Amino acid sequence: MRRNSSMDMRTDRTSSPPDTQTLWAVPIPPSVSLMINRDGSPECRAVGGNPAADISWIPESDNVTTRSRMEPDNTWTVISTYSEHGISGREVKCNVSHPAFTHPQIMSVLIPDVVVSVVAGSVGILHCAHDPGDTFIMSTWYVLPLYKALCYMSMTDNNTFNNCTERAKQDKMTLKILDTEITDTGEYTCEVINAEGTFKNNILLQVLVPPSVSLMINRDGSPECRAVGGNPAADISWIPESDNVTTRRGMESDNTWTVISTYSEHGISGRDVKCNVSHPAFTHPQIMSVLIPGGALAMFPRSWCSSEVSAQLLGGPGGQCLAA
């Protein structure tokens, strides 16, 4: 799993792109990245480019979904997902072409056999697929974290080696990671050697962090839904749906994500709207509602009504709690 650049603030807009007269004449190179998404599929991104980048895959597949959208600054985000089945353990390559590049940028990723998701702070347990039996010689875990350098852990009957983390505990077939952190997210390859040969399997470990969610009326009088400090980024939708929704995503310095979605529908004073926040760390979506007033008034669910949270999100007095 390789990341070519940190993800910058991005915006989803459902409005149609402007005409080509608004585009810059000088090509702007996008930031590109390749990772395994929450569904276990390779996802290639080209963010902040103009014009939009072209993304292709090696090997080719009919099961590729590519989405393009124009951002508020008239740059383009292109997201391509490779959803081919039955190819675990194989390497695929993402090829990103752009007029600002002197040559295409090619990145590769190994599709895992298994995806393991744990909540940050819990114990992550990874298993080797092959039982070495009584002829065990050595087991080694090769770790390619998303945010750190490659490391490995190995053991024989007499010796152990670990240059990854002291929180990792290894035996012949199992790797336990205590008090998991976001930086433990990555690809883990188990290699077992016994008298019969060498056996490998690949695991993607995803460390989930549930976001803090809130719903308020912003200074412009529009409902604003936030999911702060989550990993991966939360998904936010609205009821009723609207074409006038702006959603921004940004990665924080601690590698968590902030998602801010603003519902800018006009002429709906006095109506109730609902914000629906979905996240892999939630057992079910969190749904909050707010009545759009004639004047700006921040509304929060009762569980978030602490003076600290109110001060942070409201930036001053005047917020009210929603009924439970």
Image (cartoon, rainbow, N blue to C red):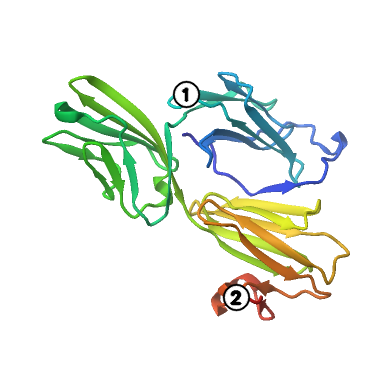
211 above or below 50? below
Residue at x 54%, y 76% (from the top left corner): 308
Label 1, secondary structure: give it: strand
Cα separation, mark 1 vs mark 2, equals 48 Å
Label 2's element? helix
Quadrant hosting residue 59 = top right
User: Residue 90: horizontal and vertical position, in percent?
Assistant: 45, 23
Q: Which residue is mark 1?
A: 91
259 or 76, nearer to the observer: 259
Quadrant assignment, res 125: top left
Q: Could one spot residue 287 in this view of the protein?
A: yes
10 Å crowding of disc 2: few (<14), some (14-19), many (20+) = few
Q: Amino acid at mark 1?
A: Glu
Which quarter of the figure is the C terminus placed in? Answer: bottom right
Residue 305 point in image, percent of width and height: 58, 77
User: Would residue 217 be seen by someone viewing this image from the given angle?
Assistant: no
The residue to which callout 2 is attached is 302
Residue at x 48% of width, y 34% of height: 2
> Looking at the picture, which amino acid does disc 2 mark?
Arg
Nearer the observer, 243 or 314 = 243
Q: Nearer the viewer, mark 1 or mark 2?
A: 2
Residue 176's x, y, as percent?
29, 46
Q: Which residue sits at x=62%, y=57%? A: 277
Against 110, residue 230 (above or below) is below
Tally of marks: 2
